[in-house]
Image: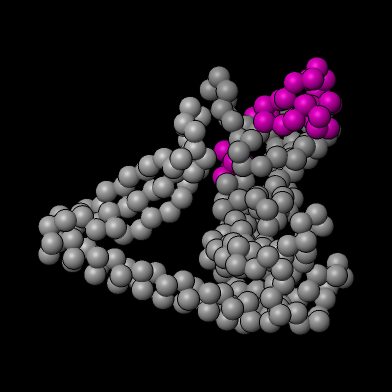
Amino acid sequence: MVENMQFEDTKKKYEIVFDGIRNKGCGSYPMFKIIMEKPVQGEARFEVTDIRTQQGRTGVNVSQHSGIAKALNSKGKDVLIVVAPEALEFVQKTHDEERNKIIEESKKDPETWRMWDGCDTGRMYISPNTELGWEFRPDLEKVKDVLEKEFYTNPTEFNTGVKDERDNVLVPHSIVMETYNKIIEKKEAKKASKQAEADVIFQKAKGTGEKQILESYPVECPDPDEECDIDIVTVYAMPDGTTQRTQNHTW
């Protein structure tokens, strides 16, 4: 793929270059550079969102801090550099292609995960050991969230003894996923068991015509004028198949 193009007319001569990916793995975004030879000499980095239309003219909005803006003596203001339609097409096409490359790259599962202890909390944190992390991979982010919630400290099966240059423990992807799947299976089994118990209670409510207690649990009392700290929430199964929730004070 062509990663730069040169443009010239009677007033301007400039080159637009693909300038890599900004914040790869944390808001990955293709960046470009416009290198101007005339009417002034200077450079400016920009991204596709910097393409603007002002007063019927479309171009690249370059920062007041760029070499181009300083060469034009913009007096502390951004400058709109009007460019050829072909230049805009090149930027948009290159942007889309580079974003697609990143998305395709993200589809490959990591070989290992990095695990470390928080400096202040001492609790476990874990992340895919790839440049992209879990960007574009909500499934991997869910794995991370579930594991960090499940384990306050490192689980024994993750203590491989293999570390990277930052002293993070490296855990094979297969072990991470095996542990994650076991957690999910346990949660699903618990959910199914709870649903089965609820079905029995709903059947009883329907059969007797009277509401039945589904669950009861304490919550913090929200009323500062009441002389109690804890309320009791009770959820009932109603004969018509709906639920009813009550909240009562304790004294």
The one nearer the camera, 211 or 97, is 211
How is the protein colored in the picture? Answer: one colour
Name the residue at the front extreme.
Answer: 251
The one nearer the camera, 50 or 88, is 50
Q: Residue at x 32, y 44 (%)?
A: 246
The one nearer the camera, 213 or 123, is 213
Relative to 56, 5 lies left or right: right
Residue 172 appearing in the image: yes
Residues shaded magenta:
61-89
**Can residue 82 be found in the magenta stretch?**
yes
Figure check: 38 above or below 103: above
Residue 144 appearing in the image: no
Return the x and y of residue 27 as percentages of the image width and height: 65, 50
Q: Residue at x 48, y 76 (%)?
A: 186
Relative to 213, 41 lies left or right: right
Figure check: 238 above or below 159: above
**Can residue 206 be found in the magenta stretch?**
no
Q: Residue at x 47, y 31 (%)?
A: 226
Q: Quadrant of residue 24?
A: bottom right
